[in-house]
Image: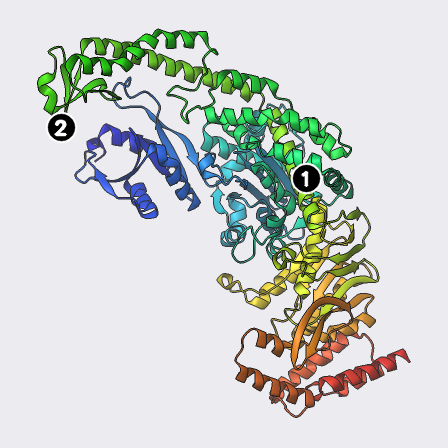
Amino acid sequence: MANKLSPMMQQYLEIKANYQDCIMFFRLGDFYEMFYEDAIEVSRELELTLTGKNCGQEERAPMCGVPFHSADTYIARLVEKGYKVAICEQTEDPAAAKGIVKREVIQIVTPGTVTSQSMLNEKENNYLASVYMDKNGMSISYCDISTGELYTTEETSSIDIFEDVLNELVKIDAKEIMINESFALHYGEDEIKAVTGGFLFVMNDSYYQQKAAEDAIKAQFGAISLTSLGLAGRELCVLSLGALLAYLLETQKQNLKQLTRCQFYEIGKHMSLDKATLRNLEITETLYDKRIQGSLLGVLDKTGTAMGSRKMKQWLREPLNNASEINLRLDAVEELTQQPMLENNLREALKQVYDFERLTGRIASGNANGKDLIALKNSVFVLPEIKGGLAYSQSMLLQQLCEQIHDLAHIYDLIDKAICEDSPYTIKEGGVIKEGYSEELDNIKFSIKDGKQWIANLENAERERTGIRNLKVGFNKVFGYYIDVTKSNIDLVPDDYIRKQTLVNNERYITPELKEMENLVLNAETKINQLEYELFTEIRADIQGYIKEIQETSQAIAQLDVLCSFSNVSNKLGYVKPMIDESFELQIEKGRHPVIEQMTGGGMFVSNDTYLNNTDTSMLIITGPNMAGKSTYMRQTALIVLMAQAGCFVPCEYARIGVVDRIFTRIGASDNLAQGQSTFFVEMSELAYILNCSKERSLIILDEIGRGTSTYDGLSIAWAAVDYLCNEQAHIRTLFATHYHELTVLEEQIKGVRNLNVDVSEENGNIVFLHKIIPGSASRSYGIHVAKLAGIPSALLENAQNKLHGLEEGSVQIEITAPKQEEMQLAAEEQISFFTPGPNPIVARLKELNLMEITPSQAIRILEELKDAIDD
């Protein structure tokens, strides 16, 4: 069958054979066409019309296509669905080709290798991550080829390396993730996909060969050894990074000039935020609808540049945990807040800066057009103003940023002299190079000036000569220049007109003089366009020599933009500079939730104090009704710590924060039904991860531990968790909200435990949440009152209220079968014995009690008696 195929289809199949895992966009004239399975798949995914093409076989080949000038839109939609797209271009001029036009794949577009401006979100990085894991540990390397950012890290001593990988991938928010085969065999791909949201591709182990990886790294950075790159002895990093570079070269089909350096970082250098914390604290997007508005990023991001917005997101996801580095940022923000004129001038200048990072990426990859260079020139133009504003800065970080901003005057002068301000999007059809830049180009343009003028005057001249008032002179790429005459005026056509084309209502003609001028002009214009293209590529190549300086400048501009945004928000919203040190104290006076405060408005938010240390106040047990503000109070504490360590002022009147290395949160309840995991199992898994990974500098937020199982089981687990976090070896700073009022007795039994509750006002059976956190424990949970606010039917509420009174008075009993009663009694005995190591009269008294027959008021009296006995 193959010998019956047309030459073009044979060419298609030969190229397609090397790209079986891709959708191939095959260039035919002004369209990209897809055939066979690709056509069927794309027509379904993009809702395109499926047609057919005669290809020498009995049946027509399924085919669909898209216009080449709008291909980015279709490619973007396919990439968003996780497809790889191979772009197969014509690599020679069809007019000069002998036989079938040569074609080859010039780029493979994947979710993590997108470079087209129209396909990228300007406020988000588009990361590709490479993960390598074996028995020795794991490494992650990731990059954004649109900006030139490249990072690598490794971990060999973690308790749970798989969780570390997941957390790092969630933090990175990679769009595409490569993993080695052995990692894929050992851990479930589905969980990685579900947690990260990225497209996952299992790579052949051939990508992860030591020598090949080393060679790829050395070649990319022009190094003779790994030592100069800071990668000596980091074999895991070498494997993940080498695989990443190999994949990029394979997909981009060109040198990666925008990747000028690789930054190694220690996972512990920044505050570690796991996937649950990033989600629960709503740092960069809201929990349920995934929107920026309503998140911390939505409040703080007032940046003026796209790269500043991306840097803001990175800083919030990766707060610092070194007090000195944090204070450098805070000092810079303080100087900007104290000099509003400087901050305003910088912010106005930053608004004129285009996306330096991605402009550089397009220049490096050879995709930049004239408009990109004009954008670069306009950005460079304001750099002296920015440097001048920073020249007299006092803070060390602002001084450093000033030094990192390069002048780039040569680039400005080159573009200003060479590139037209109104350059077209294409660089092969002229109109890009300014007059005066190239003498050769100017001479060619001058040589056809008279010819163009002759053609421009021809229409009026021929109307006068022939008397045909609607005569027109036109041009198209197929027939060149022509004289258009309506058929009603054919009898007026002169004898020297030569018919060239017949239309329904018109005839088109040429004259010998017009043909001569056409040859002169078109040949010259072809030379002009070719010369302009060559000159433009030379200019672009010249600028490529400054990529490193442009990238350093863009990084400094991005950081400055974030600092100005922090300053602006801090001034407007009344934030204060926190005191950051290496102590274990966490003191916040009149703290506010940065997001909810903005949603309530009008100064209605109720502020609260927080104090934690690692000795006598390490565990705050918070009780009170639902909706009263327990979760808000805990979240605001975590967010204030996070904001401070990111370098921003914080919403309170005073804050002293002993550096936190990790924030853990266990909030809410959710099933993982796909893996057969119940709500309680997920809760316990998250708790286990926190207890196993938390260290002395961690901050832990626990909300309702143990509520997913029976009362006694849950209470025992919650109680044991408190005991675990407050032991002789370490008192880890923890906020613990609970409805287990039984835990409040631990304030007197375990060092470090303090009780707090949310104040409530009750009048005539109705409650008012005061949202004020006060010392002590809550007297009740007010569950029925909250149910009333939620809209539960009044009949049900009245019935529930009656049952509650009956239970409290002891007049209503819940029947329990004998085995269940024995189980609960045994659980009660085990629970008490767990926390009280030796036999004593108090234990004996407790054993005599039948807990199911005691009202809350009786329980309180018995506790008072026991307390007195202990005090005696």
Give the residue number, with chain letter if any, for mark 1: 563
As helix, strand or loop, the secondary structure at mark 1 comes to helix
Q: How far apart are marks 1 and 2 (CA)?
A: 67 Å
Q: Nearer the viewer, residue 424 or 507?
A: 507
- Amino acid carrying label 2: it is Asn
- Asked if 98 appears above or below 83 in the picture, the reply is above
User: As drawn, is 657 to the left or to the right of 248?
Assistant: right
Q: How is the image coloured?
A: rainbow
Q: Nearer the viewer, residue 597 or 631?
A: 597
- Amino acid carrying label 1: it is Leu
Kindly identify the residue that appears in the image at 44 percent across and 23 percent down.
423
User: As drawn, is 445 to the left or to the right of 49?
Assistant: right
Give the residue number, with chain letter if any, for mark 2: 505
Kindly identify the residue that appears in the image at 21 percent across and 36 percent down.
1
Residue 383 x/y as whole percent? 63, 26
Residue 289 x/y as whole percent? 51, 56
As helix, strand or loop, the secondary structure at mark 2 comes to loop
Residue 582 x/y as whole percent? 81, 47
Badge 2 crowding class, 10 Å Cα cut-off, few under 14, some 14 to 19, many 20 or more, is few
Residue 261, visible in the rendered structure? no
